[in-house]
Amino acid sequence: MTLNANEQMWSDLGIDLESHGQLMNALGPIYGEIYLSQENRPKGMGFYDFVVGDIHGIRVKELREHAKEGGKVVATYCVFVPEEFCWATGAIPISLCAGTQFSVPVAEEVLPRNTCALIKSSYGFKLGRLCPYVQVSHLIVGETTCDGKKKMFELMAEQHPVYVMEVPNKRGAAGRTLWQQEVRDFKAKIEELTGNEITAENLAGAIKKVNARRKEFKRLSALRAADPAPISGKDALLATQVSMYDDVDREVQMMQALNDELEERVRKGEGVAPKGAKRILISGSPMAIPNWKLHHIIESAGAVVVGEESCTGSRFFDELVPEGTENLEDMLTVLADRYLKTNCACFTPNTERLDDIIRMARDLKADGVIHYNLQFCHTYANEAVQVDRALAEAGIPLLRVETDYSDEDAGQLKTRIDAFLEML
């Protein structure tokens, strides 16, 4: 069999070509139905269509070229991992795929079925040799944000180099001390991996470039407050998902162009949905690419998603690392403190997240909030009780949904969401 250039690259990376081909063949039509069928999309989304159109091709080739020249690729699953250390040492950080049902069955041959879809999808991509981003990486960095992930990382370490950062359960003095040391240990690990020292100068440069991307996403978030909304929730989510594994400088450039276009739309009063369309804030579990199910159901019902309080939303970009610090030790301290502000449900207590949801709902003029919980994600499921109470006190309507990556419950979700939108 003659392989084309991409297939040869995937074969060299040890990908199961037959299964991978099935995955790619399924993704194209799904993307076409969910994304390309939208009307009046910003022209700036053409870049993201291009990226997804060759999702396992161009970027993977860039990473391989980087590796051939001696560079390292560091793969992550979580926004707690300080990517600045990678950029400072010449390594490339990438966020891994973990959002499809396709990789779940192979994972269920090992993991219990009553494990959350994100964990099973992550593990299935490695076990089934389905993801070239996993294969091209030199190190996978995990974290202790949930017990299921911790145990999965132990199994994954049998097949791939894995390093785990310990995230504290509480953000008091003891938790901060633990996290400050974890960040410094991770710095040493990246220096060991790359053979390059992290200095005040190269870390300051890395902080500045990652902050520049965060600022563009904050700008996008502010633009989504306009009515009519200048961009769909699906497109905003996609831009975030892609930016988590794309080159940071390129993403700044693409997002600047997209935001400039959206500003012009807002000035002209142009939108992707009619003025007055119901506006929804989504809060809860992350949505790794290609998990677009909930956004698609909501927006197909005539509403528009105006924000995501999640790790694939505000937690990815809301907090900047303070710049202007010249001493390396002080720089490490403020960097660690910035990541500790990530309002993940792994913390107890986590009242800051409740404040975030209410603030975002008001800033984005949301008519209601949909709390999205991945099935068997117990931290977010239990914290949803407090979210429910807080939003009730604030007078903000809430719908709680629990789902996975399959389409089996799409009809049921549609019925519930239609009823929720009717009620608003």
Image (cartoon, helix red, strand yellow):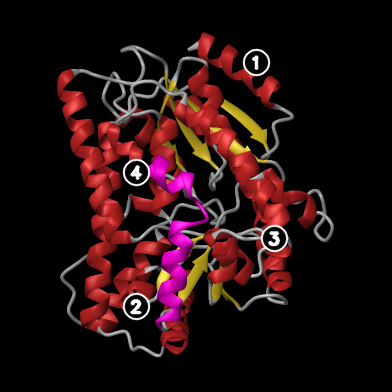
Q: Residues within 10 Å of mark 1 (few under 14, many from 20)?
A: few
Q: Are the residues at dot 4 and dot 1 in contact (C-beta closer than 8 Å)? A: no
Cα gap from disc 4 to disc 1, whole angstroms: 34 Å
Q: Are the residues at dot 2 and dot 1 in contact (C-beta closer than 8 Å)? A: no
Q: Going from the N terminus, do you reach mark 4 or mark 3 first? A: 3
- Disc 4 vs disc 1: which is toward the camera? 4
Q: Secondary structure at mark 3?
A: loop
At a point 69% along the width and 60% down the height, the residue shown is 1
Q: Going from the N terminus, do you reach mark 4 or mark 1 first? A: 4
Q: Which labelled disc corresponds to residue 47?
A: 4
Magenta stretch contains residue 305: no
Q: Secondary structure at mark 2?
A: loop
At a point 66% along the width and 40% down the height, the residue shown is 405
- Disc 2 vs disc 1: which is toward the camera? 2
Range of magenta residues: 47-69
Q: Across the whole image, how many numbered discs are drawn on residues?
A: 4
Type of residue at label 3?
Answer: Met
- Disc 3 vs disc 2: which is toward the camera? 3
Cα gap from disc 4 to disc 3, whole angstroms: 32 Å
Q: Which residue is mark 3?
A: 1
At a point 64% along the width and 51% down the height, the residue shown is 118
Type of residue at label 1?
Answer: Thr
Q: Which residue is mark 2?
A: 90
Q: Are the residues at dot 1 and dot 3 in contact (C-beta closer than 8 Å)? A: no
Q: Secondary structure at mark 4?
A: helix
Above or below: residue 60 compared with residue 328: above
Q: Is residue 314 left or right of residue 265?
A: right
Q: Going from the N terminus, do you reach mark 2 or mark 1 first? A: 2
Q: Going from the N terminus, do you reach mark 1 or mark 3 first? A: 3
Type of residue at label 2?
Answer: Gly
